[in-house]
């Protein structure tokens, strides 16, 4: 059973694989190798990439010689991942927490920035645990809170432009949310019966073209896109002016933005 938050997320990503690939895909790709390492993915590992997006993690797993099964809730993402990862055993549409696989189907599972897009993160993890056979591992990434500079930037842009937030933004039900901290995500993994829980912070500087970074919200990606698409043209112009002003401090050689960011990488064993 999906939640209202799940339904909202489906609507935000519908048909937006190309927009995601241009804007945020490179950011989300940064932890891919570390994610696979944490899940113990090597040649011969049968791995599930849940929420594959345009197939970044799945492609890297295939390059390691793993047997890859990839799923995503959004049809345009599935189509993009199929094109990108023809060596995968299977790429199909499916969404956590309901996977169309039997128990003990894979040796490992990964979910790269997926828990922040599901209405019941604990149920999603429990479903990953169900399909991973012992002694396998599960690894996930999430964005942390307090937010690093990259994630704070858009809020600062909207505030400087005088954009009013909707009175009610889609959120997880309170009983399904968790602190976006190392302790919070570790507790989530422990709570669904996983063992040997580990969590680390990955920090890096994301380099991107300013127009590509602007294109994400302009093309409706995520909560930022929801805010952007509800603005009249004059407000969008103000947002753009503040975007140019506030990103000036992050301009690097060649005109790229250099945005400091971080993610939490958590992993655990199925026993």
Image (cartoon, rainbow, N blue to C red):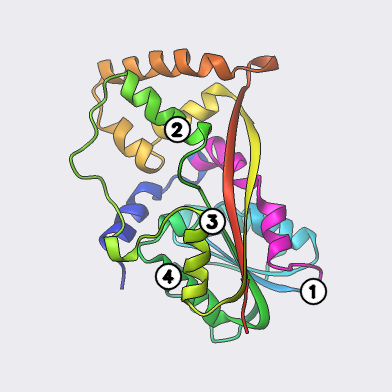
**SS at circle 4:** helix
In the rendered image of this protein, does residue 125 appear above or below residue 156?
A: below
Q: Which mark is residue 122?
A: 4
Q: Nearer the viewer, mark 1 or mark 2?
A: 2
Q: Which residue is mark 2?
A: 152
Q: Quadrant of the C terminus?
A: bottom right
- Which numbered disc, 3 or 4, marks the residue that appears first in the sequence? 4
Q: Which residue is mark 3?
A: 182
**SS at circle 3:** helix
Tags 3 and 2 in contact by the CB under 8 Å rule? no
Magenta residue check for 24: yes
- Determine the main secondary structure of the stretch shown in magenta: helix
Residue 237 placement (x, y as % from top left) = 33, 15
Query: Viewed as shown, does residue 51 lie left or right of 34?
Result: left
Residue stretch rendered in magenta on the structure: 20-44
Q: Residues within 10 Å of mark 3 (few under 14, many from 20)?
A: many
**How far apart in space, not on screen, are marks 3 and 1 (Cα)?**
30 Å
- Which numbered disc, 1 or 4, marks the residue that appears first in the sequence? 1
């Amino acid at each position: 059973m999906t939640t209202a938050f799940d339904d909202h997320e489906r609507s935000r990503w519908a048909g937006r694989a190309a927009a995601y690939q241009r804007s945020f895909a490179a950011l989300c790709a940064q932890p891919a190798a570390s994610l696979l390492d944490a899940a113990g993915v090597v040649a011969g590992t049968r791995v599930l990439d849940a929420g594959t997006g345009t197939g970044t993690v799945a492609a890297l797993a295939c390059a390691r010689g793993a047997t890859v099964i990839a799923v995503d809730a959004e049809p345009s993402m599935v189509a993009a991942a199929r094109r990108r990862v023809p060596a995968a055993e299977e790429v199909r549409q499916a969404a956590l927490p309901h996977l169309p696989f039997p128990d003990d189907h894979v040796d490992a599972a990964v979910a790269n920035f997926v828990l922040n897009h599901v209405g019941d993160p604990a149920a999603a993890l429990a479903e990953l645990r169900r399909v991973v056979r012992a002694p396998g591992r599960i690894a996930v990434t999430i964005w942390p809170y307090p937010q690093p500079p990259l994630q704070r930037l858009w809020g600062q842009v909207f505030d400087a432009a005088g954009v009013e937030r909707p009175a009610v933004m889609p959120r997880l039900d309170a009983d399904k949310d968790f602190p976006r901290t190392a302790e919070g995500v570790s507790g989530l993994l422990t709570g669904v019966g996983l063992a040997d829980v580990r969590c680390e912070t990955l920090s890096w500087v994301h380099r991107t073209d300013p127009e590509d970074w602007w294109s994400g919200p302009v093309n409706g990606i995520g909560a930022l896109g929801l805010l952007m698409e509800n603005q009249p043209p004059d407000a969008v112009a103000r947002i753009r002016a503040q975007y140019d002003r506030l990103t000036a401090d992050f301009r690097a050689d060649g005109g790229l933005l250099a945005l400091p960011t971080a993610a939490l990488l958590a992993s655990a064993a199925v026993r």
